[in-house]
Image (cartoon, rainbow, N blue to C red):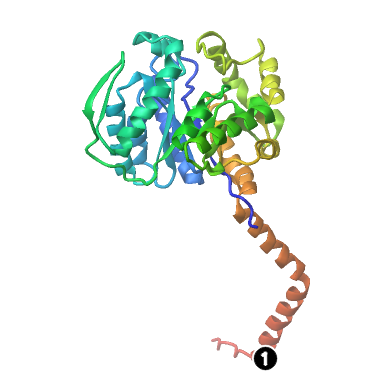
Amino acid sequence: MPPKRIRFGIFMPPFNSPATQGATSSLMRNVETIKLLDELGYDEAWVGEHHSAGVEIIADPLLFLMHVAGQTRHIRLGTGVISLPYHNPLWTADRIILADHLLRGRLMVGLGPGSLPTDAAMIGLEPADLRPALDHDTDVLMQLLRGDEPVTVTTDRYELVDARCQLALWSDPLDMVVAASVSPAGPMLAGRHGLGIISLGAMMQGAEGLTMHWDRLQVEAAEHGHVPDRKNWRLMGPMHLAETREQAIEDVRYGLDAWAEYTQDVLALPTLRAAGDTFEERVDWINESGLGVIGTPDDAIARITELDEQSGGFGCFIMLATDWANWDATRRHYELFARHVAPRFQPSSARLQASEAAARAVHDDLYEKNGAAIQAWTDQNQRTVPRAATR
């Protein structure tokens, strides 16, 4: 059996920390990051929706992705995620369908409840409202995308009366996922509608958490007549790589503390809260908790291999994009990952190594034969070249 191919990409909230950075330059760096990944052969880039707290500054992932689409060629682009309870499902469905037609196969759609309570508060929603709203609105959204019949529904957030989308999706099927953190709610919702999942913080949950996500997805999918595919399961975690562990740690002195303080004092998201009060404590927490990797390509290979074994197999690993390191070191990180990590989980690497091994095995014999052939042909065609006349 040929080696399984794991896809790779990024999950970009984005974390443009600290908030003292110029917003326009941060957004342009976010664009340049995805352009770089496209050039390096990454498979996917997911971009989030946020409206407050000063660091995650992309308010509309679809709008941002359509801007990036014209500057990239191959990488698939996903909403990571649309905070569905914030929006009317009809207009959300219409925008998704339009983007799907314009991207023609490159669009992916992720759905979630909204991660920043400061976002929800501005439109009068409490944290307790969000997950029930996501559960309800996903059902409405899927009806609108399928277009089987008009949708009429009334909630305390919106009303639809014989609503329908005038376009059908371009993709059949559209690649859609639900964000899943530590609870079974995300996998259950995904299983009910035949969608994939992005397991956020999966690297910190270990084998038990990963198994829970997949088992709940399978049970719910079976009850609703769907067959889940592990290719549609994505795991997410942060990484920063350099040639040595010491260099990787030195690189992240640039921005790790600002990111950690944002998660501790601003974000108000219990599922993503850095531990530690000092730089050294935070580095140790990331590497020792299993959340992420600050180290070398070999460290990344070992962690992804461990995740593959713990989970029973998944389709895509997406790195959490951060401002831990400066731009030059961040570029180098993505280059190292593309050059040395991703190939270890893709069939071409095994074939290249097999081809090299086959050539190495016959090298001495062919070297001698080829040298003899070159010499024989040279001797056979040897002739004296007359010397040019001189005055």
Compared across the picture, whether 308 is left or right of 25 comes to right
- The x and y percentages for residue 153 are 28, 23
- The x and y percentages for residue 337 are 60, 40
Compared across the picture, whether 202 is left or right of 54 comes to right
Q: Nearer the viewer, residue 33 or 3?
A: 3
The three-letter amino acid code for the residue at tag 1 is: Gln
Compared across the picture, whether 196 is left or right of 289 comes to left
- The x and y percentages for residue 152 are 25, 26
Query: Which residue lies at the image location 72% right of the left edge and 78% below the top edge?
Result: 371
Image vertical order of residue 318 relative to residue 379, above or below: above
Query: Which residue lies at the image location 36% right of the left edge and 9% below the top edge?
Result: 122
Residue topped by disc 1: 380
Query: Which residue lies at the image location 70% right of the left edge and 15% below the top edge?
Result: 281
Image vertical order of residue 169 relative to residue 126, above or below: below
Quadrant containing the N terminus in the rendered view: bottom right
Image vertical order of residue 15 relative to residue 11, above or below: above
